[in-house]
Image (tube, helix red, strand yellow):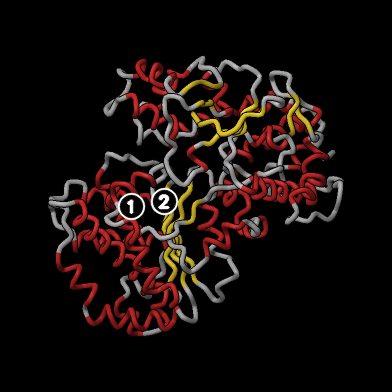
Amino acid sequence: MEPTEKILDLGFQYPFGEESCEHELEVLQDKYPDYFYEESRFNQEALDTDVYLIVGRRGSGKTSLTQYFNFQKRFRNSHSIDVDEPEIYQNILQKIANSAYLSPDLAINDVRKIWEYLIWSIIFNEYSHLDSTIKSAAVFSGKKMKPARIISEIVNGLLTKYVDSNGRVMGELTEALSNPVFSKAKEKAVEFTRKEPIIIAIDTFERYDRGNAAMMTVTASLVQCANNFNIAYANKGIHVKAFVSAEIFPYIKESAITNTTKFIRHPLYLRWRPKDLIRLISWRFFRYLTEHKFKLPSKKVDWEDFDDILHKMWYPFFGEKIINLKGVEEASFPYILRHTQMRPRQLVILCNNIARETLRNGKFPNFTSIQINKAIASCEYDLADEVLNSYDLIYPKVSEIVMALTNAPMNFKGNFLDQVAKKTSDVWAEGYSLSSFRRLVAELGIVGKVRNKNRGSKIVEADFEYAMHDRLIISNEDECVIHPMFYSKLQVIKNGLVIYPFPDHEDYNNMFGEK
């Protein structure tokens, strides 16, 4: 086996890739496209002309998609701009935080104009070298500046010029959007985008405070602006893609968007399935082993065939079975997968931790040489903490609140949650109620609802909100379970049941061979 130092020299630092897109960009730099898994269904779906709204939880691949737009091959001669600068949003928030609007809808409509002006300004600056009409409307044409700097300068100038001291968008912005110079520049720009399309990916906040009206307004107005651009210009080569955190999206949809059926049209949800996940991590692992000259069970893998991937890139390394911490034998893939909320980052973290243990004892890549169950358990705290962190602004003190479930049983009736909720009444900053506690634990994917029980195998299939299109409603008599990823954090009392937190979807049918 090669020395560890040499193993870390090529490509990915770790056998299953880095744990975030940002880390991969740092490690791979200009080689990033070579190590990008292009066969994910989300890559193609995100490029569909009718997709303008992309929703995903932390670690589901939102940032990776924004990077993919830079080297995608569907739109030839395309331009790609990634708007992901925190200070942009901060500046907008500061300006409108204390706005004197009589109605939230009026505020959203006005802030939408800021987004519209910003997006057109980005387009003008991108194509200004091609036409004098476009150049006349461009803010920084001819100046050599990084895109992030240009965007930041545009926002600052826009806010200074068109937002008054009371945080209201002035009427002059409406006039600016319709003046002859601006309108002619738009017409000219479209002539070029038909031949050279542009993709503008706008990422939003990492964490949200649902009580922050300005934050909700900025996001809702972006969604509505992206919708308008999609309807008017997607068929003309202008593709605006708004990325929104799934942690906050239900609140945006339910209370911030002015008209849901009008402005939220077929959003793309980054909900990964087992076939998607095993292809992604196995392809990365295959690349790693190949480049580091490890012997492969097979040099050819059919990446479209789930069984072929299992038999050539999973079973030879992880084994077909794993003994869990209660001494029960389980199929290896669902065992590892059920300790995630079906997000790529979580699975990468688990698999890399297993690989790291074998690197330490000199047995890489023979993962069956270690106790995989303990390697998984050692990651559970970090995975649970990341979920709690992502909701800390939505539910202040969420980490303290959920600890009331410490020493809870694996399964229980829904009304048990009310008993637990009462212990948290003095922890909530505001909004405490029995129903709020149920909402919280369902929303975070800590508690799910039993769908099916196999008494022979002790496998319990359960629905969790993160895999659903809508809210998970828990009634008093519903049988509930704790998600396996939270067992260590909450010191759950185990009883030998095997919880499968997978949705009722055809991709899961007969996949694990134990249902």
The residue under the point 82% across, 34% down is 366
- Depicted 84 relative to depicted 187: above or below: above
Residue 37 position in % (x across, y down): 65, 56
Q: Secondary structure at mark 2?
A: strand
The residue under the point 30% across, 80% down is 136
> Pointer 2 and pointer 1: residues touching (CB < 8 Å)?
yes
Residue 91 position in % (x across, y down): 28, 51
Number of residues whose C-alpha sits closer than 10 Å to that of mark 2, classed few (under 14), some (14–19) or many (20 or more): many
Give the amino acid type for the residue marked by disc 2 in the picture.
Answer: Val
Mark sitting earlier along the chain (2/1): 1
In the displayed structure image, the side of residue 376 where residue 313 appears, left or right: right
The residue under the point 35% across, 17% down is 422
- Depicted 506 relative to depicted 415: above or below: below
Pick the front one: 188 or 259: 259
Pick the front one: 204 or 323: 323
**Residue 339, visible in the rendered structure:** no
Whole-number angstrom distance, CA of label 2 to CA of label 1: 8 Å
Residue 103: image tag = none
- Depicted 26 relative to depicted 427: above or below: below
Residue 484 position in % (x across, y down): 58, 28
Q: Secondary structure at mark 1?
A: helix
Instruction: Determine which quarter of the picture holds residue 222.
Output: bottom left
- Per the image, the residue denoted by label 1 is 219
Give the amino acid type for the residue marked by disc 1 in the picture.
Answer: Thr
Which of the image's four quarters has the C terminus?
Answer: top right
- Per the image, the residue denoted by label 2 is 244
Instruction: Determine which quarter of the picture holds residue 372.
Output: top right
The residue under the point 57% across, 52% down is 25
In the displayed structure image, the side of residue 326 where residue 422 appears, left or right: left
